[in-house]
Amino acid sequence: MKRRDWLLLFAAYRGAPDGLDPIRFQKGLFLFAQRAQVPARSKYTFEPYAYGPMSRGIYHDLDRLVDEGLVERVAVPGKHWSRYKPSRVTFREGKRIIKQAEDEKLLDAARELFQIKQDVANVGFKELLERVYSEHPEFAVNSVFRKSA
Amino acid sequence: MTLIAALRCSDGLILGSDSQETRGARGHRLARSTQKLYEPRPGFLLAWAGPQDVAQGFTLRLARARRLSPSTDRLEIKARLHEILVELREDSSIEARSDHVELLIAWWSRSEGKHVGLHLFSGGAGEWVVTWAFGGMELGIESATFASGTLRYIDPTTLTLEQAKIVVLKVLRDAIDTTVEGIGGQIQLGTVQKGGVRVLDKADVRGLHDTVNLWESQCAELLPGAAAPPLTGDTRDRGVSPPSRATRDRTEPTRYSA
């Protein structure tokens, strides 16, 4: 499986029907890269950035998924960011990816990704950052935010 | 029309600008995207506001100027830059040579061992950047001054370059949001510090936008009910369920190193 398959599955999973912001995609796929037993080529690479771990590849692939009609970019009123929202196509692709994960003996990783989505979608930004910084302080070294955890 | 900004912080200096170039009379204006911030010669960072042909003329002359480097005494650099502006105003091949132009120029002064910023006006004035400096369209400057004023509880001189970048980005985008016409487009940013000059690429600026988004979101979260996590929405969730525990991998999963 390619890393963008995991990104698309993350979008397709239950847990955020109105879509997720780019930060939660970044943090979710980072935790997946740290925890899941998948080949290195299936993981995004992250750098310690101003808001903790950040992967340029995720930004790039999210844009591609939008261009290909696999997720929708939805503007958030009053905010500067868009959410990436799943559609029927996303759900169909998500089911296909789970089947592929089964074929490649990666179902544990698929379950892990689901649990990570529930975790990142259920907390505020402050708590999310604190969890990530506390678990992986090496990725918080360039953070501009105070680490209170 | 343009909005350009400079901010000096503890260990560097940030220049920023909008990217919209507007042409035509009021009510019939056309906007297009243009680069307003670049490194015209090694060690110097430049942002411009005003007619593009004047800015291009200045940039070319600065790029070709002899014996000018960040090691040169800053008063001498200032005098040389003024000379270039005078040359421009006398160059009849530049159509808009008499129009008002503002430039923000920054470099790491090797002789002084610190970051230096200069706000130059085509009329001849020049001011050293102390903390904030804005140039360009009058309404944009007013908006940016107001936006920076709302952050007066933050002392820029104590900020690191990384922190100051997000402050500049926030001020520029707040100014663009509240200014009706004439400025806009993607924000361009560049930095000067001891290690040199850097113009940020689009991916970097995008990451910084998300950093500002996080900053603003955390402010909103301080007010109970102002920012609920995505899982708590009312929308019916048609998302994909995880593979059940009953679904087993066909063989023992391969172990991969993390």
Image (spheres, rainbow, N blue to C red):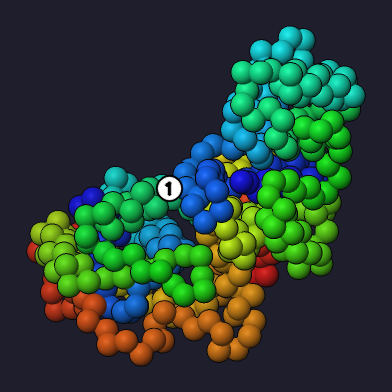
Which residue: 22% across, 71% down? A87
The residue type indicated by label 1 comes to Arg
Query: As displayed, is residue B84 above or below residue B114?
Result: above
Q: Secondary structure at mark 1?
A: helix
Picture coordinates of residue A100, whole percent (x, y): 13, 60
Mark 1 surroundings: few (<14), some (14-19) or many (≥20) residues within 10 A: some
State left or right for residue A127 relative to residue A120: right
Q: Is residue B206 visible?
A: no
Q: Quadrant of residue B53?
A: top right
Picture coordinates of residue A135, whole percent (x, y): 53, 64
Picture coordinates of residue A142, whole percent (x, y): 63, 51
Picture coordinates of residue A83, whole percent (x, y): 39, 68
Instruction: Specify the subunit that label 1 lies on.
Output: A
The residue lying toward the viewer, choosing from B235 and B170, is B170
Which residue: 36% across, 69% down? A74
Which residue: 22% across, 81% down? B238
In the rendered image, the residue lying farthest to the top is B66
Q: Is residue A101 visible?
A: yes
Give the residue at mark 1: A56
The residue lying toward the viewer, choosing from B87 and B16, is B87
The residue lying toward the viewer, choosing from B127 and B27, is B27
